[in-house]
Image (cartoon, rainbow, N blue to C red):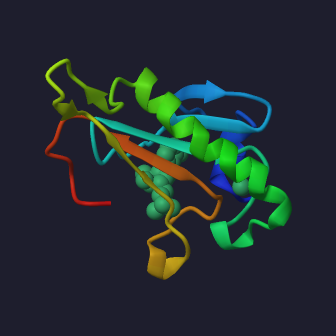
Amino acid sequence: MDNCIFCKIAAKQIPSSIVYEDEELLAFKDINPAAPVHVLIIPKKHIATLSDADAQDGVLLGKMLALAPKIAKEQRCDVQTGSDGQVSGGYKTLINTGPDGGQEVYHLHVHVIGGPKPWRGQR
Ligand code: AMP
Ligand code: ZN
């Protein structure tokens, strides 16, 4: 898509802070982070919204979701259980869809948001 900022990021036409890349997916830091860790996972191919994903995109969607805990671990915000059984850490995964869903960039992305609180807002 010619006018899509995330397609341009995937094509390396616009710089981004990349934290993960493979043949199908790219993950990079959000330019306006809502929390100490704020990474966006995108498919390299253009899908405008979650509602535009079709049945054949199921595996791709699964890969995007499965990447989230790996990113969280690398960014040191994964959920932890201490030797005393105390659970700490953790992160939020979020897909905004359409205007009423708060979507601003029309290229499918999963937000991975974590790190020590307080965070800005509740996204
Ligand atoms: P959404 O509201 O779910 O569409 O989220 C879009 C996100 O993309 C926002 O959190 C923006 O801060 C982020 N964003 C927009 N442009 C860029 C960019 N060039 N690099 C990194 N993140 C961006
Ligand atoms: Zn795009």
Identity of the residue drawn at 34% across and 23% down: 76
Residue 52 spot, x, y in % from top left: 73, 71
Q: Is residue 122 left or right of residue 73?
A: left
Corner quadrant of residue 67: top right
Q: Residue at x 21, y 34 (%)?
A: 87
Residue at image point 68% right, 42% down: 63
**How far from the left and from the top, in percent, is residue 90?**
31, 38
Q: Residue furthest right?
A: 56
Q: Is residue 105 left or right of residue 46?
A: left
* Nearer to the camera, 72 or 42: 72
- Residue at the (55%, 33%) spot, across then down: 16
The residue lying furthest to the top in this view is: 83
State the image coordinates of residue 59 (x, y, percent, origin top left). 77, 49
Q: Is any atom of residue 83 visible in this view?
A: yes
Which quadrant would the N terminus be assigned to in this image? bottom right
Q: Residue furthest bottom?
A: 100
Number of marks in the rendered image: 0
Above-or-below relation of 58 to 10: below
Q: Ligand 2 lies in which image quarter? A: bottom right
Nearer to us in this view, 34 or 9: 34
Location of residue 4 (image quadrant): bottom right
Judge whether residue 2 can be spotted in this image: no
Asked if 75 appears above or below 122 in the picture, the reply is above
Task: Tell me: 10 left or right of 93.
Answer: right
Query: Residue 14 location in percent, x, y?
Result: 63, 38
Seen in the picture, residue 81 relative to 38 is either above or below; the reply is: above
State which quarter of the image contains the C terminus. Answer: bottom left
